[in-house]
Image (tube, helix red, strand yellow):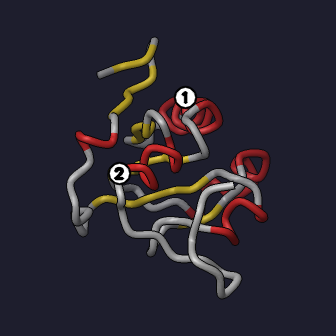
Amino acid sequence: MTYGAIPTVDIAGVPDPLPQALHVLDVREDLEWQHGHIEGAQHIPLMELPGRLGEIPESRVLVVCKIGGRSAQAVGYLQARGLDAVNLEGGMVDWFAAGRAMVSENDQTPHVV
């Protein structure tokens, strides 16, 4: 599915467990990341993305945020620079609602803020 020109997938279209070849990029802010994220994901807040572009591997990238707006912006940016990126529609809200595994950085039960 595409949202405008942005390749988009909903939670049902994301394999569980995630394939090894899929790189997950979380573009939420630090506080959101600390409360809960996908294990093994890379964290680069959206506003830092231009300066950290070189840190993203040249593989298929699943981009996530809270509900899909910031990640859609990130996917557009990454695609314009030649990276193979797709947006998770519904973001971490849908990930959590689907019962997918999460970890936190604050020793609390992972959740979405």
Residue 32, placed above or below residue 10:
below
Residue 106 in the image: state x and y as whole percent: 70, 82
Query: Identity of the amino acid at label 2?
Result: Ala
Element carrying mark 1: helix
Q: Can you tell which quarter of the image residue 10 is in?
A: top left
Residue 109 in the image: state x and y as whole percent: 58, 77
The one of 38 and 2 positioned closer to us in this rendering: 38
Residue 99 in the image: state x and y as whole percent: 36, 59
Q: Work out how far the residue at label 1 is from the one at label 2, CA to CA, in angstroms.
A: 26 Å
Residue 34, placed above or below residue 45:
below
Residue 18 in the image: state x and y as whole percent: 26, 63
- Taking the image as shown, residue 12 lies to the left or right of residue 76, namely left
Q: Mark 2 sits on what residue?
A: 98
- Taking the image as shown, residue 19 lies to the left or right of residue 52, namely left
Of the 4 image quadrants, the one containing the C terminus is bottom right
Element carrying mark 2: loop
The crowd level at tag 2 (other Cα within 10 Å; few <14, some 14-19, many 20+) is few
Which residue corresponds to the image point at 75% horizontal and 56% vertical from the top-left? 29
Residue 3, placed above or below residue 29:
above
The one of 56 and 25 positioned closer to us in this rendering: 25
Query: Identity of the amino acid at label 1?
Result: Gly
Which residue corresponds to the image point at 38% horizontal and 29% vertical from the top-left? 8
Of the 4 image quadrants, the one containing the N terminus is top left
The one of 24 and 83 positioned closer to us in this rendering: 24
Q: Mark 1 sits on what residue?
A: 76
